[in-house]
Image: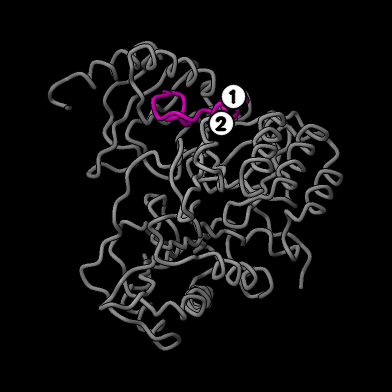
Amino acid sequence: MSSALRPSACPGLLRIVQALDGGICRIKLNGGSISVAQAEAVADAAERFAGGVIEATNRANLQIRGIGREHGALIDSLMLAGLGPSSVAGDDVRNLMLSPGAGIDQQMLVDTRPLAEQILTTLQSDERFHDLSAKFAVQLDGGERLVMLEHPHDLWLSAAERDGTRVFAFGLAGCLVDAPVGAVLLEQGHALVVAVLELFLELARPEQTRMRHLLAECSLDTFLARLAERVPLMSIKAWQREATPGALHIGTHPQRDAGRVYIGAVPPLGRLNPAMLRGAAQLAREQGDGTLRFTPWQSLLLPGVFGDDAPHVIHSLEHLGLRCSTDDALAHLIACTGSTGCGKGLADTKVDARQLAALLQRHGQALNVHLSGCQRSCAAAHIAPVTLLAVSLGHYDLYFRDAAQPGFGALHARNLTIEAVAALLDARSRSPLDA
């Protein structure tokens, strides 16, 4: 096995990428879950070897920003905590996203964690799959209420019922809300993932790094016919992934275990400091099940809390600076690093987002808004209902999501200040046309 890392713009645990504010290290979490000891190791590493900025990402991972020169010591400390890959070349390909509620969600059809562990082991141990792009990603859905429906993946599997039998519906180059292209029996889930990845690597040219690139040239019917030679496929007609209520990642929600709840808390704009992470870990140790789960909404869950203890835990989390109320405007905003940390950023999105949150809170509004410093949309893998695209310091173009429009959606207004954005959003929300 080659120990050389492939060139990539994506940071990893073993590849620290430079930004304006220092190095970035991305820690991929198995199923988004981290033990309290591992969380404390991340907090220690951010404090000792970096500027103390820890970010929750939109793929339920963690990043440490502002890393100085001691790359080796930081990496060693995280590897020692069990946060690294089982093989050097396996770091890039650990891109498997689960529901944050895997195994504990009241609505789940399947506990996806054993299959996820099997898939992650295969991705890291089978050298063939080390040729996958660092962006190639798989989503595994057990039918939970708490699930990210809108992030596109190269392959997705979703637990479903077909003629009284539980199966995995699956799709390629899309989201869970898309129509599936087929299904397999639950016990064929691992074989399906392996077969799709093998076939992709056989058919794709080096520059075709994502499933969508291949399917733009190779027809879906051709791909599925080849796939059916490797794993038994079934049709699954008229199946649609059930939509879920919003904001299940915020506040208190019941688990499958009677009397137990998980508590969702949002670090403001996805950023934690070491004290926040240590404090959340301590609460998980004393009041929860000894783990934290990170989510695609750049938030965290504290599972396994007794229902009677939830108010105390929420109070403690909020005291740390985390947001646990759906009425909190800041809990609904996402923003990229912005001009202070990224050379492509045209505005200080983090500062502007806090200003916007304060104005929206004053108006009694809690809207899902995405502030992006440039066209790349690093902070959001899906299209938000409202997007502010920076054009200069403190000024943004305003877009509203529109399924008929590409990119961020329909352009509504140009070159707005944050004050003007807040006023416009407030007026729009109060308009009877938008009620």
Where on the picture, by quarter, is residue 382? top left
Is residue 142 rendered to the left or right of residue 13? left
Tell me: residue 103, above or below residue 218: above
User: Which secondary structure, mark 2?
Assistant: loop
As drawn, the residue found furthest toward the left would be 433
Q: Which of the marked residues, 1 or 2, is nearer the chain's N terminus?
A: 2
Which circle, 1 or 2, is nearer the viewer? 1
Q: Quadrant of residue 71?
A: top right
Position of the N terminus by quadrant: bottom right
Q: Residue furthest bottom?
A: 229
User: Which residue is under mark 2?
Assistant: 267
Q: Are marks 1 and 2 in contact (CB under 8 Å)?
A: yes
Q: Which residues are magenta?
A: 312-334
The C terminus lies in which quarter of the figure?
top left
- Depicted 228 relative to depicted 278: above or below: below
- The verdict on residue 24 being magenta is no
Residue 321's disc is: 1
Mark 2 is surrounded, within 10 Å at the Cα level, by few (under 14), some (14 to 19) or many (20 or more) other residues, namely many
Q: Is residue 157 shown to the viewer in this render?
A: yes
